[in-house]
Image (cartoon, rainbow, N blue to C red):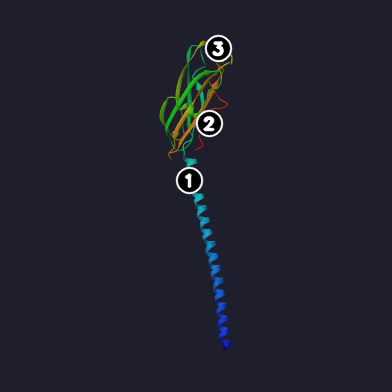
C-alpha cells in the first residue's frame, strides 16, 4: 500500500487540530454554562432568603404586642373588705390585637402560684375583646375579699397578695399569641403590686 500524498496527511493533521480545538471550546462552554447555572441558583436562593427575612421583619414590626404595664389596687388593703385589683393593658403596635381573651385570678398565698399557660386554660375566660393599636387602658377589675386573718398574715409577711393570669390574642397576620403575668404585694399600706420573680412569660411566635 502506498502512503497518502503529503497534502492529504497535512489535511488530516489540520482536521485533528481543528476538532481538538472544538472539543476544548465545547468543554469551556460547558464549564461556563455550569458556572452560570450555579450563580443563578445561588442568586435565587439569596433572593428567597431575603424575601423571607423581609416578611419576618414586616410581621415583627407590624404585629400586635400586648404587655401589662402594671397591676394596682384601688386602695390599700383593709380587713373584711374587698380589695379591687386594676390591671392595665398596653398594645404598643400600630395594628390591633384581635380576639383577646383574659383569664385572671387573685389569691392570698404563702408561696407563689403556678403560672403557666396550660394550667390557666382551665380557668373561665373573663372577657373577649379587641385592643386597638397604640392603646393603653384598664382592661379588667377583680374584687377579692380580704379577711382579718388574711390581712394579719399579709402584714406579718407570711403570705402575699397575688394577681396572676393569662392573656391570649391574635395578630392581623392570623398568628396566635399569649402571655402570662404575675404580680404580688405583702405590704398592706401600698397600692402598687410588684412583678413576681417568675410567671411572666410570652410566646416566641
Outermost residue, front side? 1
Contact between labelled residues 2 and 3, with CB atoms less than 8 Å apart: no
Give above or below for 70 relative to 95: above
What residue sits 55% from the left and 85% below the top? 8
Per the image, label 2 sits on a secondary structure element best described as strand
Per the image, label 1 sits on a secondary structure element best described as helix
Q: CA distance from mark 3 to mark 2?
A: 31 Å
Per the image, label 3 sits on a secondary structure element best described as helix
What residue sits 52% from the left and 21% below the top? 162
Question: x%, y% of residue 205?
Answer: 49, 38
What residue sits 53% from the left and 70% below the top? 26
Give above or below for 73 relative to 64: above
Q: Can you identify the residue that label 1 sits on?
A: 55
Q: Can you identify the residue that label 2 sits on?
A: 201
The mark nearer the N terminus, 3 or 2, is 3
The mark nearer the N terminus, 1 or 2, is 1
Q: CA distance from mark 1 to mark 3?
A: 55 Å
Question: x%, y% of residue 150?
Answer: 53, 13
For the image, the number of numbered tags is: 3
Q: CA distance from mark 1 to mark 2?
A: 25 Å
Position of the N terminus by quadrant: bottom right
Residue 152, label in figure: 3
Q: Residues within 10 Å of mark 3 (few under 14, many from 20)?
A: some
Q: Give the label, 3 or 2, closer to the camera.
A: 2
Amino acid at each position: 500500500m502506498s502512503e497518502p500524498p503529503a497534502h492529504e496527511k497535512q489535511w488530516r493533521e489540520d482536521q485533528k487540530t481543528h476538532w481538538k480545538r472544538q472539543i476544548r471550546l465545547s468543554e469551556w462552554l460547558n464549564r461556563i454554562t455550569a458556572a452560570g447555572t450555579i450563580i443563578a441558583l445561588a442568586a435565587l436562593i439569596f433572593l428567597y432568603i431575603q424575601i423571607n427575612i423581609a416578611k419576618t421583619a414586616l410581621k415583627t414590626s407590624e404585629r400586635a404586642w400586648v404587655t401589662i404595664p402594671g397591676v394596682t389596687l384601688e386602695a390599700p388593703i383593709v380587713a373584711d373588705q374587698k380589695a379591687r385589683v386594676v390591671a392595665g393593658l398596653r398594645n404598643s403596635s400600630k395594628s390591633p390585637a384581635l380576639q383577646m381573651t383574659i383569664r385572671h385570678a387573685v389569691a392570698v398565698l404563702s408561696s407563689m402560684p403556678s403560672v403557666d399557660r396550660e394550667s390557666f386554660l382551665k380557668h373561665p375566660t373573663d372577657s373577649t375583646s379587641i385592643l386597638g393599636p397604640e392603646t393603653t387602658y384598664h382592661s379588667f377589675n377583680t374584687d377579692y375579699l380580704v379577711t382579718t386573718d388574711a390581712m394579719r398574715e399579709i402584714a406579718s409577711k407570711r403570705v402575699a397578695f397575688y394577681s396572676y393570669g393569662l392573656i391570649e390574642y391574635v395578630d392581623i397576620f392570623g398568628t396566635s399569641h399569649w402571655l402570662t403575668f404575675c404580680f404580688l404585694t405583702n405590704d398592706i399600706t401600698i397600692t402598687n403590686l410588684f412583678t413576681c420573680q417568675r410567671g411572666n412569660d410570652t410566646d416566641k411566635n
